[in-house]
């Protein structure tokens, strides 16, 4: 089967929505070095709510990009890690994150010129 993201009903659009989501991109980047616990992720991603992190992790797991592993401790300890599919996606996202860091000053200057410093 050949997928066509330009077709309105193609499921690749859902996948593109997932990987274009800022929270997903940040979570995947933090999982690159190895497994992370929920609270460690939450502490490192400033501005993400517990609810949004939970939703993001569930979606990434449903798409096969990460795995969730629970340990029988009190309270239960849960770790998340990349799957091979998630690692392959990170190899594409790493240059995107690096591009954003390298070019944010230029984008900010362009926004200032247009009077849109807040990103609108």
Image (cartoon, rainbow, N blue to C red):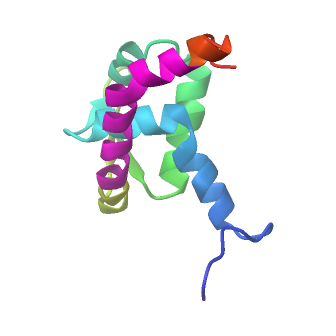
Answer whether residue 63 is magenta in the image. Answer: no
Answer whether residue 101 is magenta in the image. Answer: yes
Q: Is residue 3 above or below residue 54?
A: below
Question: Which of the pair 18/7 is nearer the observer?
Answer: 7
Q: Is residue 57 above or below residue 41?
A: below
Q: Which residues are magenta?
A: 90-110
Look at the magenta stretch and give its main secondary structure: helix
Q: Position of residue 118 (x, y in %)?
A: 63, 11
Q: Is residue 41 left or right of residue 60?
A: left
Q: Is residue 60 above or below residue 73?
A: below
The residue at 72%/70% (across/down) is 10
Q: Position of residue 14 (x, y in %)?
A: 66, 56
Residue furthest to the right: 8
Q: Position of residue 109 (x, y in %)?
A: 49, 16
Residue furthest to the front: 113
The residue at 57%/39% (across/down) is 21
Quarter of the rendering occupied by the C terminus: top right
Quadrant of residue 113 in the image? top right
| Residue 49 appears in the figure | yes
Residue furthest to the left: 33
Q: Is residue 66 above or below residue 56?
A: below
Q: Position of residue 66 (x, y in %)?
A: 39, 49
Quadrant of residue 111 in the image? top right
Quarter of the rendering occupied by the N terminus: bottom right
Question: Which of the pair 22/68 is nearer the observer?
Answer: 22
The residue at 32%/60% (across/down) is 88
| Residue 77 appears in the figure | no
Quadrant of residue 106 in the image? top left
């Amino acid at each position: 089967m050949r997928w066509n993201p330009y077709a309105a009903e193609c499921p690749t659009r859902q996948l593109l929505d997932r990987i274009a989501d800022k929270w997903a991109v940040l979570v995947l980047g933090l999982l690159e070095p190895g497994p992370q616990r929920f609270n460690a992720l939450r502490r490192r991603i400033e501005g993400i709510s517990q609810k949004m992190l939970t939703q993001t992790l569930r979606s990434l797991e449903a798409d096969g990009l990460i795995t969730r592993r629970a340990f029988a401790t009190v309270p239960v300890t849960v770790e998340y890690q990349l799957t091979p599919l998630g690692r392959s996606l990170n190899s594409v996202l790493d240059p995107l994150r690096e591009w954003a860091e390298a070019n944010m000053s230029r984008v900010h200057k362009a926004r200032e010129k247009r009077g849109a410093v807040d990103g609108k």
